Image: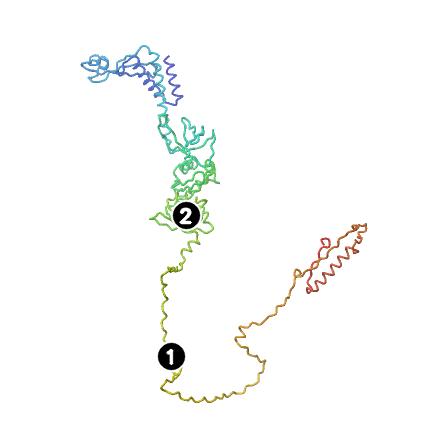
Amino acid sequence: MKSEFLMAITQLAAEKNLPKEVILSAVETALVTAYKKESFSPTQNISVKINRNTGEVKVYLLKTAAETVADPGREIPLPEAKKLNQQVQVGEVVEVEATPQNAGRIAAQTAKQVVLQRLREAEHDAIFEEYHGKEADIVSGIVQRIEPKQIVLELGRTQGILPLVEQVRGERYRVGQRMKLYLMEVVRTPKGPQVLVSRAHRNLLRRLLELEVPEIFNGLVEVKAIAREAGFRSKVAVAARQPGIDPVGCCVGQRGIRIQNIVNELNGEKIDIVLWDAGSSAFVANALSPAQVLSVNVVDADKAATVVVPDRQLSLAIGKDGQNARLAAKLTGWRIDIKSSSAAEAEKAPQPEVVQPVEAGTEAPLPPAPQPVEAVPVAAAAAPAEIAVPTAAQEPRPVAAPEPVTAAVAPTAPPQGPVTVGVPVEEAFFTPKPVEVKSQLRFAEDLQVRRVVKPEVVGKKPKKRGGGREEPGAGGESKAKKVRRKEDYLDEVEEELGGEQIGAEDPQGG
């Protein structure tokens, strides 16, 4: 019977995944409660001990040694206490064996309930301690139940809760699906520990990198910063702790095999691995990858950076809905302003002066008056002659008529070459001569060529004979004659065009 009891304890410990000592302690506590209800008074202190080898159960009364006994249920005379323990002193506790013969049905039922409760509490404590040590780590779970506001997953010994806010937008979950999750927090509740997991946390990407990249797990490559928009795109800044190691190449792997495994686990989420730099300008330029950066101007006081990119890569630097610039700002912690090269040059160019508008009812400022220019005579001889103006007191004097001046013209020799008749300047420069424009080239399209209208044949169609000759139709002309007439007409048109050749139309086409 006792061996069966120990075997049952061992089996229960294996099923609950609890230590055997924890199970025995729970049974001892349950027996204390059961014996107090049936065999002892509630004021008495008792203890139950189970032999770990034989499974024998013994009940002990806890009494205090005293010279004068006031309460026999809780105190024992000192001489009797000396018989049980020679070294006991007044005020010390002595264990007195008082094992009942048999426990009743009520005591057994009470012990059963207490054992189950204690085992449940012990199991909850064990689960809490196990998963509390896994906080901020990655766990694997299977979707067990899908609810409107959360998803319940099986994590092994307990269940995990995936709230709606921690789910990735665009992911579709199904019952039985296995996935990796980030364990955020373990909370104690009356129903047991509650484990909260996440698929949208940025540290999930960090743990996946540690699983796939041995250099990160060993500490040779450090993940400096992570910016993530779950389900769409992420940026990771890495740096090497040991010289001679390419941190970006370690994360990407040969032919991208390492990063591809992480992308597959995150259902196609794009991941950019950039190189971390201690310099702010270089780090901001790397964070805007894959866009090329021409220059970066940083203001340390405001934590702001102005980035100039080529015109053709402005949209690439900003990203779809500003995603690339937003992730770069989260990764660096800087406020980033992106400008194209043409806009930056336009800002550097001098701005024209803006004329202030004049309000109604106010006088516009007049322009400054021109300064008087003092005329300086070139020479005394060049000064104009003074003209005397007669006044009322003076009578006008008669002015003598000027004598005619005869200019002696030397005889000139007759011109040897052609004589050029002079043309007035105004007529030569301002009177254009009419120029007759003659057409030197004419095109066949400029002429309206008469088309030969085929007469309608009312009678029978011409019959073909074996010789290949055609019978004349109702019009009285054969087809060959019509073609010759058309060629003659085209020859006449060529003569009118000055010998240009015009391609004859296909006689079959009409």
The kind of secondary structure element at disc 2 is helix
Report the side of 223 relative to 172 (left or right).
left
Frontmost residue, 308 versus 407: 407
The image quadrant of residue 79 is: top left
> Mark 1: which amino acid?
Pro
Q: Which residue appears at 46% of the width and 89% of the height?
A: 403
Measuring from the top left, give residue 389's x and y in whole percent: 38, 84
Measuring from the top left, give residue 172's x and y in whole percent: 47, 34
Real-space CA distance between mark 2 and mark 1, rounded to the nearest whole angstrom: 72 Å
Residue behind mark 1: 377
502 is higher (above) or lower (below) than 234: below
The image quadrant of residue 478 is: bottom right
Measuring from the top left, give residue 341's x and y in whole percent: 43, 53
Frontmost residue, 469 versus 265: 469
Furthest toward the front, the residue is 392
Residue behind mark 2: 285
Q: Callout 1 environment at 10 Å: few (<14), some (14 to 19), or many (20+)? A: few
The kind of secondary structure element at disc 1 is loop
415 is higher (above) or lower (below) than 290: below
Closer mark to the observer between disc 2 and disc 1: 1
Mark carried by residue 364: none
Report the side of 494 relative to 213 (left or right).
right
Pointer 2 or 1: first along the chain: 2
Frontmost residue, 248 versus 198: 198
Q: Which residue appears at 78% of the width and 55% of the height?
A: 475
